[in-house]
Image (cartoon, helix red, strand yellow):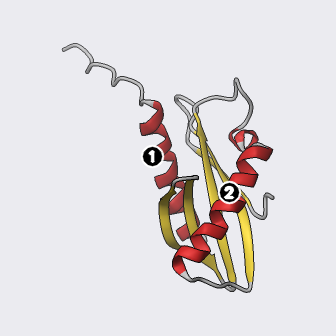
Amino acid sequence: MPPPPARPPLTRSQLGALGEDIAVRYLTDHGLLVLDRNWRHARGELDVVAREADALVFCEVKTRRGTGYGVPAEAVTAVKRRRLRTLSGLWLQAHEAHAAQLRFDVVAVLALPGRPVQVTHHRAAF
């Protein structure tokens, strides 16, 4: 009997969605309460908004299937950080939310073929 056909590789959007699911599971397993996912605004998108104790946490999720262009967290450039700060303010306005602290985290998901997925949580990354 021939082996089953190989599954086609995930598209970029499918890989991103899988990475976000893995990141959310990781965050909730580590005690964060997810308040929002994929919040969209004309100026961009917030991947995950969560709460941990008195902190409101805005999480950027970066997923890669290799390190040829660097590790996933390196993709959060200065331009991206500025955009996320702007979007966090817009999210706070839209939700009339307040928090004692705001924090910006990066959750890096590395899905190397044939290996277990690696998740790295960079707390207060910027």
Residue at the location (78% across, 64% down)?
124
Q: Earlier in the sequence, mark 1 or mark 2?
A: 1
Would you say 84 lies left or right of 17 here?
Answer: right
Q: Residue furthest left?
A: 1
Would you say 76 lies left or right of 47 here?
Answer: right
The x, y position of residue 105, in whole percent, is 71, 61
Q: Residue under circle 1? A: 17
- Mark in the foreground, 1 or 2: 2
SS under mark 1: helix
Residue at the location (59% across, 76% down)?
93
Q: Quadrant of the N terminus?
A: top left
The x, y position of residue 3, in whole percent, is 27, 17
Which three-letter amino acid code belongs to the residue tagged 1? Ala
Query: Does the image show residue 37?
Result: yes
Would you say 54 lies left or right of 41 here?
Answer: right
Which three-letter amino acid code belongs to the residue tagged 2? Leu
Q: Quadrant of the C terminus?
A: bottom right
Q: Residue furthest front?
A: 42
Residue at the location (72% across, 63% down)?
104
Dot 1 alpha-carbon crowd within 10 angstroms: few under 14, some 14 to 19, many 20 or more:
some
Query: Does the image show residue 33?
Result: no
Question: Residue 8, located in which quarter of the rendered image?
Answer: top left
Q: Which of the two residues, 123 or 35, is positioned nearer the viewer here?
A: 35
Would you say 98 lies left or right of 102 here?
Answer: left
The x, y position of residue 46, in whole percent, is 57, 58
Residue at the location (52% across, 53% down)?
42
Q: Residue under circle 2? A: 84
Dot 2 alpha-carbon crowd within 10 angstroms: few under 14, some 14 to 19, many 20 or more:
many
The x, y position of residue 119, in whole percent, is 63, 50
